[in-house]
């Protein structure tokens, strides 16, 4: 199983999108400063995650959320509220 996830910093409200095959481990890594991109933004909370059968599917979805359209959709969800549908 593979996951994409969206984190939000409780420090500066910025979001981070990533993918992994072990969501729990990855969240611990982010919040313990082991990820250079989010190191200075801890603590982080999980806003959303999706699971996929293949790595390819998860990577494609991750790329969508990191694209302009995905970022616009994220902004819309922040304005209207989660969960993402």
Image: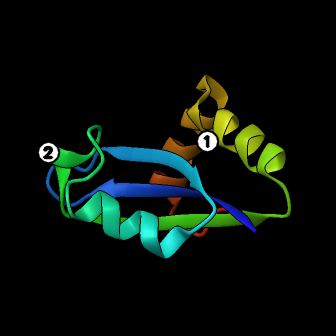
Determine whether the residue tagged by mark 1 lies in a helix, strand or loop.
helix
Determine whether the residue tagged by mark 2 lies in a helix, strand or loop.
helix
Relative to 62, say whether 48 is above or below.
Answer: below
**Mark 1 crowd level (few <14, some 14–19, many ≥20, 10 Å Cα):** some
Q: Quadrant of the C terminus?
A: bottom right
Q: Position of residue 81 (x, y in %)?
A: 50, 64
Q: Quadrant of the N terminus?
A: bottom right
Q: Position of residue 43 (x, y in %)?
A: 19, 63
- The residue shown at (54%, 54%) is 77
Specify whether 75 is left or right of 67.
left
Reading the image, the residue beneath label 2 is 40
Q: Position of residue 66 (x, y in %)?
A: 57, 33
Q: CA distance from mark 1 to mark 2?
A: 25 Å
Name the one closer to the observer, 56 or 74. Answer: 56
Q: Nearer the viewer, mark 1 or mark 2?
A: 2
**Mark 2 crowd level (few <14, some 14–19, many ≥20, 10 Å Cα):** some
Q: Earlier in the sequence, mark 1 or mark 2?
A: 2
- The image's mark for residue 73 is 1
Relative to 57, say whether 53 is above or below.
Answer: below
């Amino acid at each position: 199983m593979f996951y994409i996830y969206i984190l939000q910093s409780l420090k500066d409200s910025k979001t981070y999108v990533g993918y992994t095959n072990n969501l729990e481990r990855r969240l611990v890594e982010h919040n313990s400063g082991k990820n250079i991109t989010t190191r200075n933004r801890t603590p982080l909370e999980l806003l959303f995650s999706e699971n996929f059968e293949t790595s390819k599917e998860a990577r494609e979805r991750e790329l969508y959320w990191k694209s302009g359209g995905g970022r616009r959709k994220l902004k819309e969800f922040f304005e209207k509220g989660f969960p993402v549908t």
